[in-house]
């Protein structure tokens, strides 16, 4: 009978994951912002009444999912249990209690069965605008970066807070999109709630306590078993990235001991005066994600499987305190996995992926008609990716978002949102670092204002001056390039202008190679040239090396 009970619990666990996956798909299908609808920049999950994450949707990004695991506890600390009612929905975009910057909206809703609180559902999505300076690094404090929403009720007993909706509409550039996304987030949690209650009625469950104990005990034991198999000790790694106006040094010491893996970011440069700082909640999310990818990738994410992975840091650019500007926290945050994995590579030589482009090459475009002409005004957000680092036994992936995991946004969907034309979007030959395994290729993107228009854009790029490093003898990937079609070089970060008649050219960086280039097989080398990933001239240079 005990065996049958365990099988039943495993089935219920899988069922719970399917509930939150449907929750996430609701957000994908109803979202207004292309970053959510097309790229999947979101998260969804279910939590027990104590605010501990039971399950997360596979759909979503680590930066949202892992921060959400901590954010729900902040909601429970702010809203007393006696003030929670059926039909409630709570919201915030507090960077230090949510997901690290103001553009991400986190919503939490209690789930009641027969008047008893049985769970919480939470979800997060990136919205196109929150007012202020817009999505960019130019702010000097979080107060410049947009509207801050403290933890509060979006709806109480099913009645939406109209005052909050009016404040949103008054403070953002795209009110219909933003308010629409708020309702989509609320609907996302409602679908999760309905599916959970259906599941509980069908199975006769009164609460999730027994299922939660099963999930946490199995996940904790499995994760600790994986940690026990790691070598014990401490390893240190450093890397330098572009920063805003000066390079930034990131440092991490990784310590593995019984029952715990600790990433400590002491030695990292101090907080920046520009909006590239990262709250610790986001740094934790990506540090834990990187470690879990190597140590326990097959164990589902929940509070117990994440708990043994710890993060510490003094105040610095990876642990910025309020009111530091944090709009582009993802740029530094996406570098954290490469930083942590570089330390882990010393403990597990020959087993860890090389560095990749890491940070997304996001671009926010604010398009408008030329002076004296009529046309559309629009805010357009586009996600782009460079190449991933080469793996020990496989080439890197081309134009793939790692570690964020978001999808490529289709050209057609992006052009539909505003008066821009994307003239070119193609892989960038010779951008992957040479090696026994080749780094992933970046891509070339060419964007122009539509006829009669011009645009300002917020550059959010890195690896322009400090390319991804190869591993174990592999060569570095190609650095990124930002310029106009007339050759004018542009800055990798900050708001800049593209006049009518000009085109913006982005060359996203490639990933580092793994192992010495001389060890690459002749067949793989020939296939690279045939596919156009490596040009014949570059191939000859590698052969000579």
Image (tube, rainbow, N blue to C red):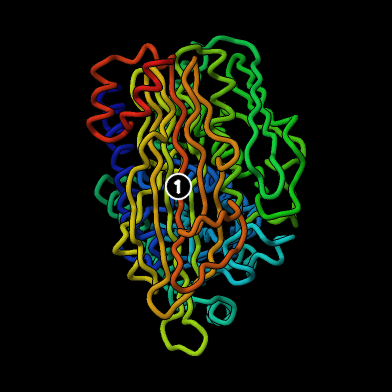
Query: What residue would you read off at disc 1?
Result: 507
Q: Residue at x 43, y 50 (%)?
A: 43
Q: Nearer the viewer, residue 408 or 500?
A: 500
350 up-or-down from 91: above or below: above
Q: Which of 326 and 413 is in front in this view?
A: 413
Q: Position of residue 355 (x, y in %)?
A: 50, 29
Q: Where is residue 403 in the image (x, y as percent from the top left)?
A: 46, 38
Exactly how many numbered labels are in the figure? Answer: 1
Q: Is mark 1 on a helix, strand or loop?
A: strand
Q: In terms of image quadrants, where is residue 497? A: bottom right
44 up-or-down from 390: above or below: below
Q: Which residue is drawn at 55% across and 13% down?
A: 347
From where the camera sits, is residue 444 visible?
A: yes
Quadrant location, the N terminus: top left
240 up-or-down from 342: above or below: below
Q: Is residue 136 left or right of residue 210?
A: right
Q: Which residue is drawn at 27% across and 15% down?
A: 522
Task: Determine crowd level at label 1: few under 14, some 14-19, many 20+ residues with C-alpha closer than 10 A.
Answer: many
Quadrant location, the C terminus: top left
324 up-or-down from 448: above or below: above
Q: In terms of image quadrants, where is residue 319? A: top right
Q: Position of residue 476 (x, y in %)?
A: 50, 27
């Amino acid at each position: 009978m005990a065996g049958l009970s365990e099988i039943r619990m495993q089935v219920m666990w899988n069922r719970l994951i399917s509930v939150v996956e449907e929750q996430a798909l609701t957000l994908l299908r109803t979202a207004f912002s292309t970053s959510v609808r097309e790229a999947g920049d979101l998260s969804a999950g279910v939590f027990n009444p104590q605010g501990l994450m039971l399950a997360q949707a596979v759909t979503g990004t680590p930066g949202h999912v892992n921060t959400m695991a901590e954010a729900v506890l902040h909601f429970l600390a702010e809203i007393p249990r006696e003030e929670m009612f059926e039909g409630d929905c709570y919201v915030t975009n507090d960077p230090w209690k949510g997901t690290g910057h103001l553009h991400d909206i986190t919503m939490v809703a209690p789930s009641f069965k027969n008047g008893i609180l049985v769970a919480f559902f939470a979800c997060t999505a990136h919205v196109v605008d929150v007012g202020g300076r817009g999505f960019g690094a130019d702010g000097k404090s979080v107060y410049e970066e947009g509207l801050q929403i403290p933890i509060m009720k979006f709806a109480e007993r099913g009645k939406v807070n109209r005052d909050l909706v009016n404040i949103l509409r008054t403070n953002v550039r795209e009110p219909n999109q933003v308010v629409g996304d708020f309702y989509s987030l609320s609907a996302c949690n409602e679908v999760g709630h309905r599916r959970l209650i259906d599941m509980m009625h069908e199975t006769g469950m009164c609460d999730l306590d027994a299922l939660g104990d099963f999930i946490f005990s199995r996940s904790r034991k499995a994760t600790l078993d994986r940690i026990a198999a790691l070598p014990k000790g401490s390893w240190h790694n450093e890397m330098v990235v572009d920063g805003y106006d000066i390079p930034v040094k990131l440092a991490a010491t990784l310590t593995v001991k019984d029952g715990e893996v600790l990433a400590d970011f002491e030695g990292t440069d101090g907080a920046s005066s520009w909006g590239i700082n990262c709250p610790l909640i986001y740094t934790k999310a990506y540090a834990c994600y990187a470690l879990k990818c190597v140590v326990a990738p097959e164990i589902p994410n929940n509070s117990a499987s994440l708990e043994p992975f710890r993060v510490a840091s003094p105040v610095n650019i990876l642990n910025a305190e309020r009111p530091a500007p944090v709009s582009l926290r993802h740029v530094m945050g996406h570098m954290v996995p490469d930083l942590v994995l570089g330390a882990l590579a010393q403990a597990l030589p020959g087993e860890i992926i090389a560095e990749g482009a890491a940070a997304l090459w996001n671009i926010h475009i604010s398009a408008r008609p030329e002076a004296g002409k009529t046309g559309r005004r629009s805010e357009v957000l586009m996600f782009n990716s460079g190449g991933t680092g080469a793996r020990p036994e496989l080439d890197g992936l081309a134009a793939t978002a790692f570690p964020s995991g978001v999808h490529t946004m289709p050209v057609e969907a992006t052009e539909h949102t505003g008066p821009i034309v994307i003239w070119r979007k193609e892989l960038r030959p010779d951008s992957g670092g040479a090696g026994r395994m080749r780094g992933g290729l970046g891509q070339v993107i060419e964007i122009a204002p539509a006829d009669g228009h011009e645009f300002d854009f917020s550059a959010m790029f890195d690896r322009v001056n400090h390319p991804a490093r190869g591993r174990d003898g592999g060569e570095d990937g190609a650095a990124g390039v930002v310029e106009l079609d007339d050759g004018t070089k542009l800055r990798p970060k900050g708001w800049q202008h593209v006049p009518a008649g000009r085109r913006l050219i982005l060359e996203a960086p490639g990933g580092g190679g793994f192992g010495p280039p001389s060890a690459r097989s002749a067949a793989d080398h020939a296939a690279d040239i045939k596919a156009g990933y490596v040009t014949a001239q570059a191939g000859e240079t590698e052969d000579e090396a």
